[in-house]
Each structure stands twice: as structure tokens, then as C-alpha cells.
Amino acid sequence: MWNDFKTFILRGNVMDLAVAVVIGASFGSIVKSLVDDLIMPPIGMLTGGADFGSHYVLLKAGAKAPPPYVTPAAAKEAGAVTLNYGTFVGTIVTFLIVAMAIFVLVRALNKLHAKPAPATPTTKPCQYCTLPIPLAATRCPNCTSQLSAA
């Protein structure tokens, strides 16, 4: 059983997957930093410093303290029931920015890869029966027609 487990773990696919997960987590933190530290501050300036996380709808007031509540956290602390649509909108905006950043990065990486040269044809169609024949053929092996030199 131990040998089977060792063979399974050391198999190339499992190791590739493990490396992909570790690199993916690191890449995720890089993209999160890109969004939080470089992209969101200018967006915050453009929207007048709007903080999506502080927008909510009060469904039921809390028993510990009466409304108004400044933040959803204050409402939750007071025992109120809220619909935190601002957090949801902020998460969607962050997702769209992350998706765009990944799209741009993948597109740039794809441009770096060399495209394979087009394959040189090794056959041509017979001028009589249109079946494929080797380029150097002088007689069609299918219909036995004599082929012209051109």
C-alpha cells in the first residue's frame, strides 16, 4: 500500500497540480495587491471616495441599540438584520477588475509564445480524380492517370 501511495504522489500529474496550486495562490496574492493597491485607489478618487462596503438596507432594527447605524458592522453588533448590498457590489467590482487583469496578463503571455510555422504540404490533389497524391508523383496511384509535369 505504501508503494502505491508513493507512486501516486510522485506521479507527474500530482506534482504538476501541487505546483500549480502553490503558484496560483501566490499569483492570487499578486493580483489582489494589484487591485487593492494600484487599481482601486484611482477608482476611489474617481467615485469621490465612495466606500461600497458601508452601503446596506436595514431589514430589522437591533435590540441592543436603535438606528441609525453607521456601518453594517455597527448594525450587526447592535443585533440588527441588514442586507449588505454594498459589500456585494464591491466584491463584483473587485472580481471584474481581477478578471480584466488576468485577461490582460494572459493575452500578453500568449503574444510572447512563438506561433508554429505553417506546415509545408506533402501532397497535392490529382488533377483527374482529386484524391491526394505525393508532390513528386508522376502517375496517380488511385486512377493511374499520367500527371503533367506542372
Image (cartoon, helix red, strand yellow):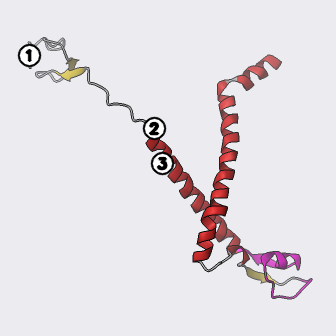
Amino acid at the residue labelled 2: His
Asked whether 79 falls inside the magenta stretch, the response is yes
Res 68 visible: yes
Judge whether 83 appears above or below 22 on screen. Answer: below
Amino acid at the residue labelled 3: Arg
Amino acid at the residue labelled 1: Ala
Secondary structure beneath disc 3?
Answer: helix
- The residue identified by callout 2 is 113
The answer to which image quadrant residue 67 occupies is: bottom right
- The residue identified by callout 3 is 107
Among numbered discs 3 and 2, the one appearing first in the sequence: 3
Q: Counting other residues with Cα less than 10 Å from the Cα at mark 3, is it few (<14), some (14-19), or many (20 or more)?
A: few
Q: Residue at x 83, y 79 (%)?
A: 75
Q: Residue 47: x percent and y percent?
A: 59, 78
Specify whether 98 is left or right of 10: left
- The residue identified by callout 1 is 149
Judge whether 142 appears above or below 48 on screen. Answer: above
Secondary structure beneath disc 2?
Answer: loop
The answer to which image quadrant residue 5 occupies is: top right
Contact, CB < 8 Å: mark 1 with mark 3?
no
Contact, CB < 8 Å: mark 2 with mark 1?
no
Q: Which residues are magenta?
A: 63-84
Whole-number angstrom distance, CA of label 3 to CA of label 2: 10 Å
Contact, CB < 8 Å: mark 3 with mark 2?
no
Whole-number angstrom distance, CA of label 2 to CA of label 1: 40 Å
Q: Residue at x 52, y 52 (%)?
A: 103
Quadrant for the C terminus in the image: top left
